[in-house]
Image (tube, grey):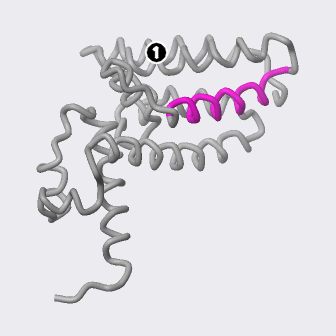
Amino acid sequence: MRYSPDHKAQTHQRIIKEASQRFRRDGIGATGLQPLMKALGLTHGGFYSHFASKDELVEKALQASAAELDEHCAQLFSEPRPLHAFIDNYLSEWHQSSPHQGCPLPTMSAELGLRGQPSSTTDAILMARLEQVQNALLGTEQANDQSLLIMSTLVGALVLSRSVHSTKLARHILDVAREHLKQTPQTSS
């Protein structure tokens, strides 16, 4: 059977997209290559015609999720109250229950750190968000530190809300963090 000239490139992108979602939802260690490839109707052996290793796929998947996040955040930060829009979205029940579609920082970065394999892509994701948050803050000297505090609180609150069994407690974590963070002065209020 003949494939179109761009078949391999399309398959490569399908693997990255599926891996990006699975790594964010299930974790890097818990995502096996064989089940990943099988879910796409591909063979485990075919993986190596696309990637040298799982580590290479992890990096490509992280880059893909970063690109999705950049696009999504560009929309949020174009809102009239950009910081509020970003905080509301980040600490939403949708984001809490959809890790496969959300920010990779609460899921993938934690595991990369534990594995001793930090990624420069994680740095890029964080720096992009910090810059957007800083731009939304009043032009004070504390904007750099405030943006780091805001991102740390967002990621931490999301991780905690995902880890508790009680739905009521999970919502309370999100609500308290959201309301506290939205008290931060902004340029566009």
* Quarter residue 185 falls in: top right
Is residue 143 found left or right of 15 in the rendered image?
A: right
Q: Is residue 79 above or below residue 105?
A: below
* Viewer-closest of 162 and 58: 58
Q: Which residues are magenta?
A: 122-138
Is residue 148 found left or right of 103 in the rendered image?
A: right
**Local SS, label 1:** helix
* Viewer-closest of 189 and 64: 64
* Quarter residue 62 falls in: top left
Which residue lies at the image location 26% right of the left edge and 84% below the top edge? 3
Which residue lies at the image location 56% right of the left edge and 35% below the top edge? 125
Q: Is residue 173 above or below residue 43?
A: above
Q: Position of residue 77 (x, y in %)?
A: 70, 39
Which residue lies at the image location 36% right of the left edge and 84% below the top edge? 5
Task: List the single residue furthest toward the right.
Answer: 139
Which residue lies at the image location 40% right of the left edge and 42% below the top edge? 59
Look at label 1 and name its amino acid: Gly
Residue 78 on the magenta segment: no
Q: Position of residue 13 (x, y in %)?
A: 37, 62
Q: Position of residue 52 (x, y in %)?
A: 28, 51
Q: Which residue is mark 1?
A: 156
Is residue 82 found left or right of 36 in the rendered image?
A: right
The C terminus sits in image quarter: top right
